[in-house]
Amino acid sequence: MTEQERIQALLQAGKITQQEADLLLSALDEGEAAVEEARKTMGEQYAAPAAADGQPEGLRWVRVRLMAGQLEARLDPGLKRPVVEGSAEVRPLGEDLEVVPNWFAEGFLHGLLGRTGTLELRLPPGWGLEVDGKAGQIEAEGIAFLRGRVAVGNVELRAVEGLDLEVTAGNIEGSLLLRDGTHRLRVSMGNAELDLLPGSSVRLNPSVSTGNQEIRGFDYGSSGVRQLGDGQASLEVALRMGNLEVRAR
């Protein structure tokens, strides 16, 4: 079900008024137009990227469609199945789970008033998080992998073990623990501050088109690439407009 169809369903169910539906549809159209315009401005290389090669096999995924609000996800080693705390519709999607907040429609309306909902996820080992976010704040702690895209919003990472994320406009900060595989962060407009935690083994490929970059604590490997440890993982960080800081802890 698309966002437009979901708004129409809420209208038919009497959960929102025609005026609210019109406002939501208008805001949705304007948001999508703004993202598309940003992608055109930033260049084709930032439009609809393919998934990075080498993503971990064997993971199951919680797939979250976030219209607005705050999403908090953390690892809980004591669980066997993901736990969703907050008002949301949870449905199986093959071996994975799809989560759609029930405050979907209220996200835009409350967002205009500065009030949004919070969705909390607790993930067991072996589960990753996939996000399709129009707007919102995302916090991830200790999880195996975070992938997807955020149109507008900030992302905070704490000891996240895998990353393939695109952000159109927003800031990303926090820590990664990368031991193997291929990882990527692409930001059209915004800043990125990343710490590579002890135990990481990674080759770093940073690029900033307009802005500054500061890389600290890395050695240069035999191929001339910045490297931490044995360089078993690879991390590409590309910023179109903004400042980049990467530190090896």
Image (cartoon, helix red, strand yellow):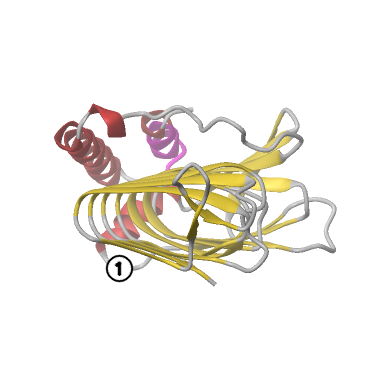
Q: In the image, residue 161 lies at what x, y percent?
A: 63, 55
Quarter of image, res 45: top left
Establish if 164 lies above or below 120.
Answer: above
Which residue is most to the bottom? 249
Magenta segment boundaries in residue numbering:
6-14
Residue type (three-letter) at the residue carrying disc 1? Gly
Q: Main secondary structure of the magenta part?
A: helix
Q: In the image, residue 92 lies at what x, y percent?
A: 71, 35
Q: Is residue 96 left or right of residue 150?
A: right
Q: In the image, residue 15 lies at what x, y percent?
A: 43, 46
Report the residue at 23% width, 60% height from top.
Answer: 212
Q: Nearer the viewer, residue 188 or 60?
A: 188
- Report helix, strand or loop for mark 1: loop
Q: Quadrant of the C terminus?
A: bottom right
Establish if 195 lies above or below 79.
Answer: below
Q: Is residue 84 left or right of residue 185?
A: right
- Res. 27 visible in picture: yes
Q: Is residue 200 left or right of residue 2?
A: right
* Residue placed under numbered mark 1 in the picture: 114
Q: In the image, residue 83 lies at what x, y percent?
A: 72, 56
The tally of labels here is 1
Magenta includes 206? no
Report the residue at 76% width, 63% height from top.
Answer: 76
